[in-house]
Image (cartoon, rainbow, N blue to C red):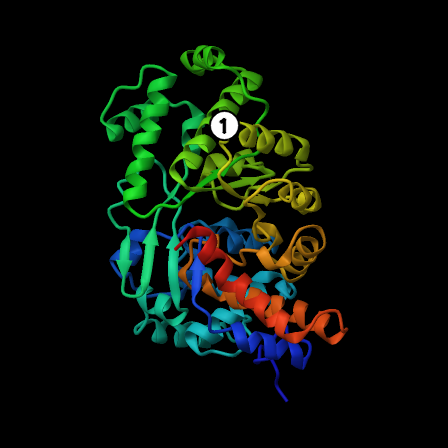
Amino acid sequence: MNNFFDDKLLLSNDTAQKIYNNIKDLPIIDYHCHLDEKQIAENKSFSDIGELWLSTDHYKWRAMRLCGVDEYYITGKASYKDKFLKYAQIMPKLIGNPLYYWTHMELKTVFGINTPLNINTAEQVYIKANQKLKDINVQSILKQFKVEYIATTDDPVSNLEHHGFYKNTSVVPTFRPDRIFKWEDNYIKQLAQKADMEINNLDDLKKAYEKRLLFFITKGCVLADHGMDFLPSEDIDENAAEKLFLNRKRLNSIEHHSLFSHLIYFLAGLYKKHGLTMQLHFGTYRNINEKMFKSIGADSGMDVMRSYVDTDKLAIFLNELNSRDWLPKTVLYSLNPSAIKAIAVISGAFKDVLVGSAWWFNDTVQGIKDQLSVIAEYAALGTNLGMLTDSRSFTSYVRFDFFRRILADYLGCLVNKGECDIDAAISVAHDICYNNVKDFLKT
């Protein structure tokens, strides 16, 4: 019997299947992603599966490089068909990689194709998928996956003209002010223009940010986000921060980090003041291949995890915010999974601080299982906010099914060992997959 990617995928027992059946059709709240809201508003169609899959997905680009594919077929000028054929060719090499699961789950769920993808089936799959694409657009994909809520990732200078409600999906912005920390004059001028004011000093910058944040809130924003290599150091006073800001083009690395930290403290307090949830993504080492970065730019598969995460700094940061009554609801993500135990323990010391999903390189079968286990043992599994796509691809919504299967199997195994009861497991699964994040974000 051919059981390739059948309904029992990742479900090792009947109890897991029962739990999964209770959660598989729940609506999706995608509270962190990099989808293009303009494509949602315009209800974009895709004429080629190569474009849909390979135009922006650095997960796939990285895998192709790992398997020796020439850059011409990755980010180069090869046709989308040729790029797809090269991707299909490496697929058997990716057994066990999340891309192997996601690729075949997308083929089955979105395109009705349950054929293993490889060089021999690639042409047939390409033709059949493109035929199916004629009847698919962005909003039909969102409807198929029951996507109720999407929080995109947006710079404070963004116009936000395409956010809104599309059929059954609410599309809202997330306030992501990372670009300011490059201290580029052109960007500061953009921010001043958008805030309709001059920015001549640090206080002006802070006022401009609050004006833009209030604008974001009018568009339904309830989330802020920061991507950072290192966690903040202890705060400096206003006078010291002002001097650094006025000298921002000539800062050394220590001074740069001090000014960065001061602004992170300020922004966290701003989020608390206006009732936003703060997300912190840390433990990244960006663009380590300098030659490739200069050639093809950022977000191209050249980022890795840091060798360590200084969780002492995290504890100090959260404590200082809490002491000032500046600590907003907070979700923590570490790219280095070795820090998750410490982060889970730290989260228990503060109200409304949670560990986020298994992020980026960690959203694998084992990575998700490990994250669930650590949260269960060191924090509280039943408070977890579940899955998000963190993706630029609309068909990535199969990742929610991927997660729900792994969660159901994790809980099902505990039930079968007599370590929890089935009703509690189903209830917790419901909470993790839908109720918790809806309540936490008040969507």
Residue 353 in the image: state x and y as whole percent: 56, 44
Q: Residue at x 26, y 50 (%)?
A: 162
Residue at mark 1: 265
Q: Residue at x 63, y 58 (%)?
A: 381
Screen quadrant of the N terminus = bottom right
Q: Residue at x 41, y 32 (%)?
A: 270
135 lies above or below 48? below
Screen quadrant of the C terminus = bottom left
364 lies above or below 300? below
The residue type indicated by label 1 comes to Tyr
Residue 149 in the image: state x and y as whole percent: 38, 58
Q: Quadrant of residue 242?
A: top left
> Can residue 73 be seen from the camera position used here?
no
Foreground of the two, 383 or 241: 383
> Can residue 403 be seen from the camera position used here?
yes
Foreground of the two, 189 or 82: 189
Residue 357 in the image: state x and y as whole percent: 57, 53
Q: Residue at x 57, y 28 (%)?
A: 320
Q: Quadrant of residue 146?
A: bottom left
Identify the residue at the far right of this view: 417
319 lies above or below 243? below
Question: In the structure shown, which secondary structural element does the residue marked by tag 1 occupy?
Answer: helix
